[in-house]
């Protein structure tokens, strides 16, 4: 039977393999054919891992042949953002400086997916070191939005969002430091989840800003998102910041009715600058939740306006420190024709890093420097605490918070690439959750008149992904009922 790769979900892929409608091997081969035919114009893949994928698919098929029970993600083709290291498989972080880097070990999230039976099919394009909101900062060319090839897919996990939207992977992993999973999910019309800080191990995630970095999945449905999280979540002794908090059965809880849940609608997220079509799509979803028995509570998160500057001080400070390791000695590109050690450091970094990464390193070094540390870095940390208190207060009144994911739908390639501040503002609704460490999900809630996807964001309390999934599932359900 021919399967339609464009509509396969994680759950339906596994069922098709379990029922022997398709073998894991032939499915992986079909995905590679589709990638060969279609990915040139989208540019979402940086490397394909055919040998590794086909070896894993053969293991799954051997189990199926023997009639043995299949693992929970058996044969499901999953793509990985190229900021997660993969043993023996090139990992670039979208940077020239790591163009030839072959990691000696696997990121925990990737290893866990594979242990659950998933087939890792390739590595996806992204903004260099995950710094960007449009994927235009990749050293390997921009990714195009599969829903409209003249537009950006969002960033920095643009490739991971695009492969799910284009049906060249069933699911993918991305990373979110200031919105890099939720914003591209909204732009490409897929589900993007940022779990609670500490819920998923960061071991093997190339560090951008360690106190803000999260790994999470892109999927076509909310229940797929829950299913993937189930298998990557949980304590990892290799990451001391991973939390020792029990992982509930997300999938089992997802259908629990949302009746009686209190949802907060923060006025600061519906202010000036919000596209009117996004506002009405999000409003309509909130009405649907009210009709399903949720109590809608107007709330205020008064420090919201400080979130972007706070983020761009803390994220750049941490980046300047994390990126000091690319010195041409241990990793990646080393300049030729240098006479002294310091010239080697300088030229290797100058040749290897792109301009946005250099801008961040300079900004971050500046805010950490003696004399400016108190005025910028320390102040930003204090504001981070105020933002956290905003949410603590809000969560005394409500179970979850609903906002738009982005102020506008996907913009055109090149539209903001010369204006870093305009680009930074694309993250206005997403950065706060990273600073506070709470989970957030973007779920499609409609299309603009031009046919561009619109995303709705749900934020929940620390480690309460279950409530978030239930609400997201209800939003998805009401949208499907309307279609
Ligand atoms: N767009 C934001 C930035 O450029 C967020 C990036 C991210 O989440 N990795 O920093």
Image (tube, rainbow, N blue to C red):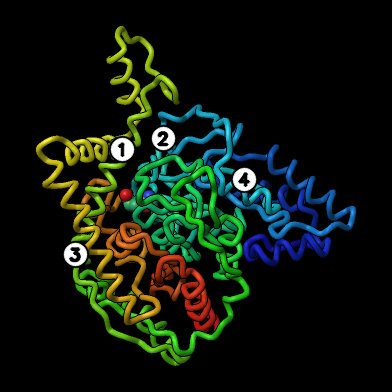
Q: Are marks 4 and 2 in contact (CB under 8 Å)?
A: no
C-alpha gap between disc 4 and disc 3: 39 Å
Q: What whole-number distance in Å separates the C-alpha atoms at marks 4 and 1?
A: 29 Å
Checking the image for residue 95, the label placed there is 2
How dense is the environment of label 3, judged by Cα within 10 Å: few (below 14), some, or many (20 and up)?
A: some
Q: Quadrant of the N terminus?
A: bottom right
Closest to the observer, 156 or 200: 200
Q: For marks 3 and 2, give the one nearer the viewer.
A: 3
Secondary structure under tag 3 reads helix
Image x and y of residue 36, in percent: 62, 44
Q: Position of residue 158 (x, y in %)?
A: 44, 52
Spatial CA span between label 1 and label 2: 9 Å
The answer to whether marks 1 and 3 mark residues whose Cβ atoms lie closer than 8 Å is no
- Camera-near label (4 vs 3) is 4
Could you say which disc has been placed on residue 357 in the image?
1
Relative to 32, is 138 on the left or the right? left
Q: Quick one: label 1 or label 2, which is nearer the N terminus?
A: 2
């Amino acid at each position: 039977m021919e399967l339609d790769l464009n509509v396969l979900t994680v759950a339906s892929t596994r069922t098709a393999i379990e029922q022997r409608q398709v073998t894991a091997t032939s499915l992986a081969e079909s995905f590679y054919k589709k990638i060969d035919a279609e990915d040139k114009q989208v540019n979402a893949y940086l490397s394909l891992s055919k040998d590794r994928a086909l070896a894993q698919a053969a293991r799954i098929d051997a189990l199926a042949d023997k009639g043995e029970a299949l693992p929970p993600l058996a044969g499901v083709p999953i793509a990985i953002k190229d900021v997660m290291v993969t043993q023996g498989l090139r990992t670039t972080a979208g940077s020239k400086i790591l163009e030839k880097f072959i990691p000696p070990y696997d990121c925990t999230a990737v290893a866990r997916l594979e242990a659950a039976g998933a087939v890792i099919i390739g590595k996806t394009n992204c903004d260099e070191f995950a710094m960007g909101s449009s994927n235009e900062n990749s050293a390997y060319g921009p990714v195009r939005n599969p829903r409209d090839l003249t537009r950006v897919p969002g960033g920095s996990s643009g490739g991971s969002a695009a492969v799910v939207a284009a049906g060249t992977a069933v699911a993918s992993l991305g990373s979110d430091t200031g919105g890099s999973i939720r914003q591209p999910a909204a732009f490409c019309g897929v589900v993007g989840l940022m779990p609670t800080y500490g819920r998923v191990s960061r071991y093997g995630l190339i560090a951008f800003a360690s106190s803000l970095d999260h790994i999470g999945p892109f999927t076509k449905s909310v229940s797929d998102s829950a299913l993937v999280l189930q298998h990557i979540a949980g304590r990892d002794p290799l990451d001391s910041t991973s939390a020792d908090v029990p992982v509930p059965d997300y999938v089992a809880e997802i259908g629990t009715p949302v009746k009686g849940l209190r949802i907060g609608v923060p006025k600061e997220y519906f202010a000036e600058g919000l596209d009117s079509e996004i506002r009405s799509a999000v409003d309509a979803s909130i009405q649907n939740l009210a009709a399903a028995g949720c109590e809608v509570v107007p709330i205020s998160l008064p420090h919201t306006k400080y979130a972007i500057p706070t983020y761009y001080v803390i994220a750049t400070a941490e980046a300047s420190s994390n990126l000091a390791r690319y010195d041409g000695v241990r990793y990646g590109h080393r300049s030729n024709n240098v006479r002294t050690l310091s010239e080697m450091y300088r030229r290797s970094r100058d040749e290897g890093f792109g301009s946005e990464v250099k801008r961040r390193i300079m900004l971050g070094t500046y805010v950490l420097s003696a004399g400016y540390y108190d005025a910028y870095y320390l102040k930003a940390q204090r504001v981070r605490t105020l933002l956290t208190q905003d949410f603590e207060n809000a969560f005394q009144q409500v179970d979850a918070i609903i906002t738009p994911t982005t102020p506008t739908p996907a913009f055109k390639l090149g539209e903001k690439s010369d204006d870093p501040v305009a680009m930074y503002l694309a993250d206005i609704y997403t950065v706060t959750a990273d600073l506070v460490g709470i989970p957030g999900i973007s779920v499609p809630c409609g299309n603009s008149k031009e046919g561009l996807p619109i995303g709705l964001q749900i934020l929940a309390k620390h480690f309460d992904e279950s409530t978030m999934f239930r609400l997201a599932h209800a939003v998805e359900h009401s949208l499907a009922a309307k279609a």
